[in-house]
Image (tube, coloured by chain):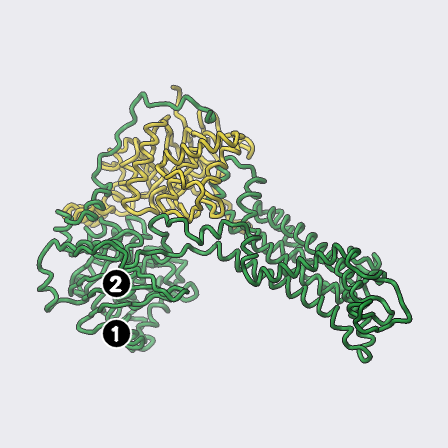
Chain colours: A green, B yellow
Amino acid sequence: MTLSSPPAEVPANGSLAASARRPLFRRVLHNPLGAVTLVFLALVVVAAVFAPLLAPHDPNAVDARNVLAPPGEAHPLGTDPSGQDVLSRLLFAARSSLLGALTTVVVASVLGVGAGLVAGYHGRRFEASASAVSDLLMALPTVVMLLAARSVIGPSSQATMAILGIMIAPAFYRVVSNAVVAVRHELYVDAARVSGLSDARIIGRHVLTVVRAPAIILAAGVGGIAIALQAGFDFLGLGDLSRPSWGGMLNTAFSVIFRSPQQLIWPGLAIGLTCVALILLGNALRDELERTGGPPARRRRSPARSRPVDEPVHSDDDRRESTADDSLLDVDRLSVGYDQPDGSVTVVVPEVSLTARRGEVHGLIGESGSGKTQTAFSVLRLLPPGGRILGGAIRLGGQDLARLSEREMTEIRGRRIAYIPQEPMSNLDPTFTIGHQLAEPLRITLGLGRAAAKEHALTLLARVGIPDPERTYSCYPHQISGGMAQRVLIAGAVSTDPDLLIADEPTTALDVTVQAEVLDLLRDLQSESRMGILLVTHNFGVVADLCDRVSVMREGRIVESGSTREVFAAPQHDYTRMLFGSILAGTEPRGPLAETGPDPATKGLPA
Amino acid sequence: MTGPLLDVRDLVVEYPVQGFGGTPFRALHGVSLDVRRGECVGLVGESGSGKTTLGRAVLGLAPVTAGRIDYDGRNIGHLTRAKRRALAAEIQVVFQDPFSSLNPALTVEQILIEPLTTQSVPRATAIARVRTLLEEVRLPASAGERLPREFSGGQRQRVAIARALALRPRLIVCDEPVSALDLSTQARVLELLREIQDSTGVAYLFVSHDLDVVRHLSHRVAVMYGGEIVECGDGDQVTSRPRHPYTQRLLLASPLPDPEQQARRRAERRRLRSDGEQVPAGPR
């Protein structure tokens, strides 16, 4: 679909582009969620780093005369059951918590990202062994492993957290190696290799940028998990008891929960808020990073701003009489637009009028972004989400399709209007056989029984020139070629003997020899059944081959319309002439190379 | 001048097949082709004919199973990564898809500077060179600070051409460089490629499925079918009066943008087909 087509012109420095180029950190600060969480986390970090300066008391100083003191001047948050200052302990505990989480994140990301990059980029043997190790680590129960480690190396918080990092590394490894495998096949990586970049530089410059986003998001989440897990261990008394920790404080508070329940508040808040902040920061990062990757906003000239409309040129004057009796499809001043998130509507087709007659092939030709596919999809009433018909009429045999309900339209699609897509393969479901996909609609639209539907489908397959219908009937889509797949779709489209067939670039994805056969088939089918065909294409050769009449489309308007012979013999509109001027067929060949061709003897680097 | 610039002899390329015991897939069955200095050799074929594989083998992106690829008299078929990197200043590429061939995260200037700084060109010189390059491919100087997605397909392809030209190579492999572009854009990009060849004397190995495109730009044309070259010769002769039945079939299948002529071509094609001249006795 042309929906994903690029903007036709370079937009003036768009705000989106400008914001995308700002560094990630500044963009996150502009995101409300990101700003709040970053400020909170920065406060926690400052508290941890400057704990010795900020804390009013020694966190381990025991004061037996002043246990469970309420908040007051000497102890802003009160004291715990041992008479230790809660605020001081909270600040010092932030150090071990953050340090522990940092250890986990650093160990996990260095191991996981490093191995993921190498495995994804080089693949083969390293990938096989790295994946085996990763699977093994993921299979081990993390908590049991940490308990075992603690019993061997003693209650060292840092070592435990480092081991946790190793256990979590597979998460990074998987994310990174998958991202790298995806990017390794991008052409710009090939181009970088041809440009002479070393593997290390390619990884650093082209691969790491892709991996960066998911890795950062994952790191924020892993940080939250590490803090929660560490608090859990400390709460269970498995941590280093000599140092204050949030989990340890929680444990202490838990022992006096009936006498002084408010003791739980501070460590609970510290753990909870820090974890939530890290996870929300991950979300904010994801939002910002994904915003850059999105396609640029499509800017179209709105009809109000566009140049004055010139009436389409008609190369013949039998248009008026055509509307009378043999007109099949009459598109009258159709306009199509897309709803934007901000409530506005982007107009992609300002005004299109065209008439297709019974028993005639009408070509709709234009370059990408001209709105030809949008027009075709409007007739089918199959515009992508957000798209809608803004005005005008689409008359098919007296009925205005633009005003029908979705249910009435379903009655018409597949029966009176059929459709052939551009990409035959993506329009067949890989999980069902060809026969199933062909016979099932027949049972619904024609009300045939199972056996009759199969028989009819086999006849159709034979009709569209498939050499062995029985065999193809039981094949899956991947077992047949693109040309065969297109024949199958054509068979399905003509199965209900439609009045109108809409073919959207039906041969663009095919080789020329296959294209010629498919065009022959369409011609034969059309002359047998006298159906009308609306053929959307960008290829003048296809139009010349198949179409009786042609409409040239540009920026959502028909600029010229007429019989194919006349338009090709004497194009009237400047744009049509320009397009004809770009055709290469029949131009002078280059001719043989002159014997004394210039030689770039001045090799070397630019001076 | 001695010998051709690029000389491919009996090249075989095989891709390993997933799983144990699978016979590797042979994409090229002993292909021979040469490109002279300043020449454009067109390589035509349908999908699966091996034309892209041949281009990738010359670029060092496809495994050479047997045969030779001589560049300037030196076999470059089995170079180490490091030696291959040194060839960056000699052989360059323009890919088909202008969307995936430019890193979306880098600005045009960063993209163009990359090959230069890799060859340790001083930064100031490199920036000046980028400016000339943008001029050469007819892009505004302000294009440097923009991201690829701010450009249309044709403009992106100009950026890709500028990147290929950055190191002043002597051979550029063009892999379907205009087939993703609109008709009018296609004509302008081809014109640009021709002008560049006239002014710099760079040689092209021009891969395409479109006979008209190849005819327009190529001095000589080779036609590939099933991993072999079935016909090779003067561009005009091969694309207008082909000798091999497959090339004839290919020519008759491409529709002419003229209803009368196309009707005649179609009739001729149908006559040939009913004469029983089916798919040529192609290679295995």
Q: Residue at x 28, y 31 (%)?
A: B234
Q: Is B30 displayed left or right of A351 in the figure? A: right
Closer-to-camera residue (A47/B63): A47
Tell me the tag on residue A403. Answer: 1
Closer-to-camera residue (B110/A60): A60
Q: Is B284 displayed left or right of A417 in the figure? A: right
Where does the N terminus of chain A fall, quadrant-wise? bottom left
Residue A556 sits in quarter: bottom left
Q: Nearer the viewer, mark 1 or mark 2?
A: 1
Horizontal and vertical percent for residue A592?
27, 28
| Element carrying mark 2 | strand
Closer-to-camera residue (A185/B159): B159
**As displayed, is residue A277 above or below residue B121?**
below
Q: CA distance from mark 1 to mark 2?
A: 19 Å
Q: Residue at x 51, y 35 (%)?
A: A196
Q: From this viewpoint, which residue is outermost toward the top?
A: B1
Q: From this viewpoint, which residue is outermost toward the front?
A: A73
**As displayed, is residue A340 above or below residue B200?**
below
Q: Is A347 displayed left or right of B121 in the figure? A: left
Q: Residue at x 24, y 47 (%)?
A: B253
**As displayed, is residue B147 above or below residue A305?**
above
Horizontal and vertical percent for residue A462?
27, 63
Q: How many marks?
A: 2
Horizontal and vertical percent for residue A199?
57, 40
Q: Which chain is home to disc 2?
A: A
Q: Residue at x 60, y 63 (%)?
A: A280
Tell me the tag on residue A502. Answer: 2
> Within 10 angstroms of label 2, few (less than 14), some, or many (20 or more) residues?
many
Horizontal and vertical percent for residue A436?
37, 69
- Which residue type carries mark 1? Arg
